[in-house]
Image (cartoon, grey):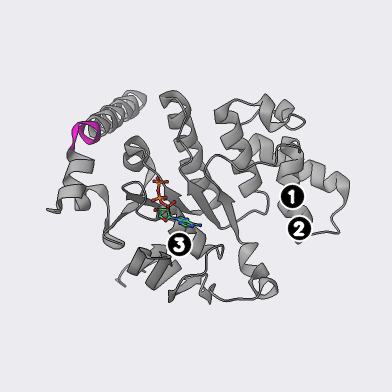
């Protein structure tokens, strides 16, 4: 029997250094995200999670290092050269970053108009309507303005825009921040469902322990200007690092584990019931 294939790396980061004036945010940061996984990124506030994401998507030019996405280098590329790679990812920024003067449908159409300026307006409307529903919004959200939406709906609208170009890779920066637990769990389910049905790779920055436990395949921990550990949560829990222990094994971490254990037990009971 041939050994199982290792999925290809969709993102690689090697020797990344970022600084702002005297403040060094990253120094010698390495990272690899594999195709099809939900890859969580955690770390204390200000450890550079968003700067890392911005470096990967080309919004921040690092001092040093190499980054590839889909095997192509992203640093120092001309805008026109990077277009083919940028089309293949979608980004949900912290807070949604929707244009407040555009409706949800118009927001979703922004990347479509940018990359495919000749698309027929009726097709733009059709795609936007489809993405609205795909993101778990009701169809009547399309003509609404961001100010008319709840926080959870705004996140979904931001997600709909991130999905506009049928990306293979999705970047989510704290998607459940500010959502109530039920809204956050629903968003997690949506992310997991999209990963499964569309085969997406997801780069997910979060502080939300429930999200990490519920949907992340692997998690990277940022501290001391680099990635200090990567693995599944059980693998991370086995490490003797004080921040990792406090984060995952503190009261909130234990509560998240207990709630996942309860959900798994419930699922197993339901499956057993269905077989009887
Ligand atoms: N454009 C910028 N100019 C100057 N400093 C910046 C800039 N962007 C980020 N920083 C600094 O870099 C550090 C890392 O910021 P970043 O937003 O990546 O942190 P984070 O880990 O995402 O934090 P949080 O969890 O609070 O969102 C912070 O100290 C921040 O002030």
Helix, strand or loop at label 1? It is helix
The local crowd at label 1, few if under 14, some if 14 to 19, many if 20 or more residues have their Cα within 10 Å, is some
Horizontal side of residue 197 vs 244, given as left or right: right
- In the image shown, does 258 or 40 lie closer to the viewer? 40
Question: Measured along the vertical axis of the image, is residue 254 above or below residue 206?
Answer: above
Residue 143 seen by the camera: yes
Q: Earlier in the sequence, mark 3 or mark 1?
A: 3
Residue 237 seen by the camera: no
The mark found on residue 53 in the picture is: none
Q: Position of residue 275 (x, y in %)?
A: 34, 28
Q: Where, by quadrant of the figure, is residue 276 drawn?
A: top left
Q: Residue at x 70, y 41 (%)?
A: 99
Horizontal side of residue 217 vs 250, given as left or right: right
Q: Where is residue 48 in the image (x, y as percent from the top left)?
A: 39, 56
The alpha-carbon separation of the residues under discs 2 and 3 comes to: 26 Å
Instruction: Mark 3 and mark 1 in contact? Answer it, CB < 8 Å.
Output: no
Q: Give the range drawn in magenta.
A: 250-254
Question: Measured along the vertical axis of the image, is residue 236 above or below residue 75?
Answer: above
Residue under pointer 3 = 35
- In the image shown, does 110 or 198 lie closer to the viewer? 110
Residue under pointer 1 = 110
**Quarter of the picture holding the N terminus:** bottom left
The local crowd at label 2, few if under 14, some if 14 to 19, many if 20 or more residues have their Cα within 10 Å, is few
Q: Is the magenta stretch mostly helix, strand or loop?
A: helix
Helix, strand or loop at label 3? It is loop
Question: Measured along the vertical axis of the image, is residue 2 above or below residue 237?
Answer: below
Instruction: Mark 2 and mark 1 in contact? Answer it, CB < 8 Å.
Output: yes
Residue under pointer 2 = 114
């Amino acid at each position: 029997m041939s050994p199982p294939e290792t999925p290809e790396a969709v993102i690689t980061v090697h020797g990344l250094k970022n600084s702002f004036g005297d403040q060094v945010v990253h120094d010698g940061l390495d990272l690899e995200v594999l195709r099809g996984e939900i890859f969580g990124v955690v770390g204390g506030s200000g450890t550079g999670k968003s700067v890392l994401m911005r470096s990967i998507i080309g919004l921040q030019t690092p001092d040093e290092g190499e980054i590839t996405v889909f095997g192509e280098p992203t640093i120092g590329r001309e805008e026109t050269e990077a277009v083919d790679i940028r089309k293949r990812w979608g980004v949900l920024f912290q807070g949604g970053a929707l244009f407040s003067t555009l409706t949800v449908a118009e927001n979703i159409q922004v990347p479509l108009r940018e990359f495919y300026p000749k698309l027929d307006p009726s097709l733009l409307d059709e795609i936007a309507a489809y993405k609205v529903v795909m993101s778990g919004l009701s169809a009547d959200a399309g003509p609404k303005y961001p100010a008319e939406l709840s926080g959870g709906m705004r996140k979904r609208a931001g997600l709909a825009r991130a999905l506009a170009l049928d990306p293979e890779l999705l970047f989510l920066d704290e998607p459940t921040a500010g959502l109530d637990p039920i809204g956050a769990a629903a968003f997690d389910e949506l992310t997991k469902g999209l990963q499964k049905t569309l085969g997406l790779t997801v780069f997910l920055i979060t502080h939300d322990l429930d999200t990490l436990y519920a949907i992340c395949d692997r998690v990277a921990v940022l501290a001391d200007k680099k990635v200090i550990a990567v693995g599944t949560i059980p693998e991370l829990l086995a490490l003797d690092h004080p921040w990792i222990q406090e984060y995952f094994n503190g009261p909130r971490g234990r509560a998240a584990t207990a709630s996942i254990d309860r959900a798994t037990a419930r699922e197993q009971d339901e499956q057993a019931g269905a077989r009887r």
